[in-house]
């Protein structure tokens, strides 16, 4: 394959030689460390978990990033949650049923729930919580538009919640997980400051939070979720190499999908770690601003997709710990459309398309910009993508920012292309959240590329009304195909999840849904 008279080759200096050299240097540095236990985390009552970024907020009403949602699951209770087998299971709810005639879901609740400050959970708290998540300022409210009434009772005589619906909605159960029970009086008194000291009814309570550490304490009296450790400390270590070295030295107990692929083999060779590799629910993609005058042209998006050598990036940059992506849903999902074929690497066709729409290096003034966060992995992956796109003749540059600035720009639409990930996706209603024209950030939604397709909107609305699972699977095959063809986002790869756990930790079960539920069963000898 060629571009003009120049042969297209896989850039060994960029991909293989540089990556292998970096790995060798990193290994040498790591092995030069003292082998003693100085600095190792030996506090048997505390599990130390490494994070690459701090959550945007610990207020579950506004926690839309993966880390914020996962921590909310430890601090707060919800009616239901997504279980390790990717099916809905009870959290505060012990059971539930649906009355199709009356269009009412009834959830029977477990008794004895209290908030972290000791106050009992009341019906007022539960009804207030639903109102908060269903309100116009909530980024989750699009999932609850068909709820027309919420009634609760939580006292010595009865414990239940009734949700009255306009019509049946197949997505409602999995979408209830973000709704956490909030202490009404405390939220109203604290206002915006509630995030500083969020008191939930979950199995852990917040002890302290700084820019680099979040410390949680287990609540031993919790009625149904009793952690086997006393404390969970989340260390925010933004630099990938530092995070790896701290893990190597034994200062970290658990790292869930927060280490560069190149470092995994080093830890495996060293020994002393449990390394869990499993297909997960994370998809890395290029977010596209569809309001950009260049990128709103489908031919431009197709050219960009063809110019990316996914297999090469996976082989040499990700150490094979990924596979090319076609859908927001991953292959372990029962709704995944396996008939879609990953885009072929075709830089010649990409260059020709770019020329045809005057988007080559001599085209659009100033070229395009790819934004990434400033994590090492994001920056390095961004460099490879920019290199490949330039090879196809696209004038493009990279900008990297700390997470808060980066995420703020994405929300405001201040970007052209950006590297992003969907994490923990199970229900296909994610397509409505991510791509329905009503779900833009201006409407507190997550359609950050501002995609609009009335035909797809109708399909996404219809999908929520399909009760039969087989029919619903067939329906979302079409949804995935349309999005795959129109490229409002450009799929890159599905990440293989890797959890590295120190050998002193026992009882850890890798969570397929990516949450922190493993911290309930894990403990340290």
Image: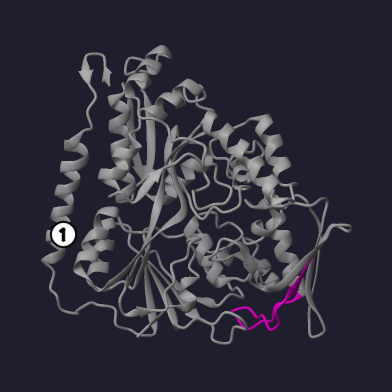
Q: Residue at x 27, y 68 (%)?
A: 247
Asked if 328 appears above or below 188 in the picture, the reply is: above
Tell me where residue 54 sits by quadrant.
bottom left
Please state, as top left, top right, bottom left or bottom right, where the C terminus lies in the image.
Answer: bottom left
The residue beneath circle 1 is: 27
Q: Residue at x 47, y 65 (%)?
A: 511
Residue 109 in magenta stretch:
yes
Decide if residue 207 is in sight here: no
**Magenta-drawn segment:** 105-122
> How many numbered badges does the structure rendering display?
1
Q: Position of residue 409 (x, y in %)?
A: 47, 41
Tell me where residue 497 sits by quadrant.
bottom left
Q: Position of residue 47 (x, y in %)?
A: 38, 77
Q: Residue at x 43, y 55 (%)?
A: 279
Of helix, strand and loop, which mostly describes the magenta segment? Answer: loop
Q: Which residue is at the front of the view, 463 or 373?
A: 463
Q: Position of residue 201 (x, y in %)?
A: 62, 75
Label 1: which secondary element: helix
Please state, as top left, top right, bottom left or bottom right, where the N terminus lies in the image.
Answer: top left
């Amino acid at each position: 394959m060629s571009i003009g008279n120049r042969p297209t080759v896989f850039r060994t200096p960029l991909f293989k030689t540089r990556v292998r050299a970096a790995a060798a240097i990193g290994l040498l540095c790591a092995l030069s460390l003292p082998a003693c236990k100085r600095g190792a985390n030996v506090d048997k009552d505390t599990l130390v978990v490494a994070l690459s970024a701090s959550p945007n907020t610990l207020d579950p009403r506004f926690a839309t990033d993966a880390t914020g949602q996962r921590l909310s699951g430890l601090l707060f209770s919800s009616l239901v949650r997504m279980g390790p087998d990717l099916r809905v299971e009870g959290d505060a709810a012990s059971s539930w049923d649906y009355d199709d005639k009356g269009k009412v879901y009834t959830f029977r609740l477990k008794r004895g729930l209290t908030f972290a400050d000791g106050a009992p959970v009341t019906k007022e708290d539960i009804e207030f919580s639903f109102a908060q998540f269903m309100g116009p300022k909530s980024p989750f409210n699009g999932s609850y538009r068909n709820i027309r009434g919420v009634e609760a009772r939580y006292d010595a005589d009865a414990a239940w919640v009734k949700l009255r619906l306009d019509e049946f909605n197949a997505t409602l159960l999995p979408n209830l997980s973000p709704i956490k029970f909030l202490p009404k009086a405390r939220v109203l008194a604290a206002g915006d400051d509630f995030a500083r000291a969020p008191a939930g009814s979950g199995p852990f309570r917040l002890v302290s939070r700084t820019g680099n550490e979040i410390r949680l304490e287990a609540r031993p009296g919790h009625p149904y979720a009793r952690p086997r450790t006393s404390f969970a400390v989340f260390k925010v270590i933004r630099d990938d190499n530092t995070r790896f070295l701290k893990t190597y030295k034994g200062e970290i107990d658990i790292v869930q999908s927060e280490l560069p692929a190149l470092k995994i083999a080093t830890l495996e060779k060293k020994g002393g770690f449990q390394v869990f590799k499993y297909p997960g629910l994370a998809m890395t993609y290029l977010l596209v601003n569809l309001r950009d005058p260049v990128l709103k042209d489908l031919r431009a998006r197709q050219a960009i997709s063809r110019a990316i050598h996914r297999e090469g990036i996976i082989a040499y940059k990700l150490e094979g710990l990924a596979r090319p992506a076609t859908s927001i849903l991953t292959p372990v999902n029962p709704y995944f459309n396996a008939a879609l074929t990953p885009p072929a690497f075709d830089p010649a066709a990409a260059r020709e398309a770019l020329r045809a729409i005057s988007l080559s290096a001599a085209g659009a003034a100033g070229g395009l910009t790819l934004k990434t966060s400033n994590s090492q992995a994001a920056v390095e992956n961004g460099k490879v993508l920019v290199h490949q796109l330039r090879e196809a003749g696209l004038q493009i540059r990279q900008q990297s920012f700390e997470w808060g600035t980066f995420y703020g720009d994405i929300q405001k639409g201040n970007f052209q292309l950006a590297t992003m990930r969907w994490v923990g996706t199970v229900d296909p209603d994610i397509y409505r959240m991510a791509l329905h024209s009503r779900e833009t950030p201006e409407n507190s939604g997550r359609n950050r590329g501002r995609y609009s397709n009335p035909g797809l909107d109708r399909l996404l609305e219809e999908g929520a009304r399909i009760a039969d699972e087989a029919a619903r699977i067939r329906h979302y095959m079409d949804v995935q195909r349309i999005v795959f063809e129109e490229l409002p986002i450009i799929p890159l790869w599905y990440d293989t999840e890797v959890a590295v756990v120190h050998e002193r930790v026992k009882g850890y079960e890798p969570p397929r849904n990516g949450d922190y539920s493993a911290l309930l069963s894990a403990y340290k000898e």
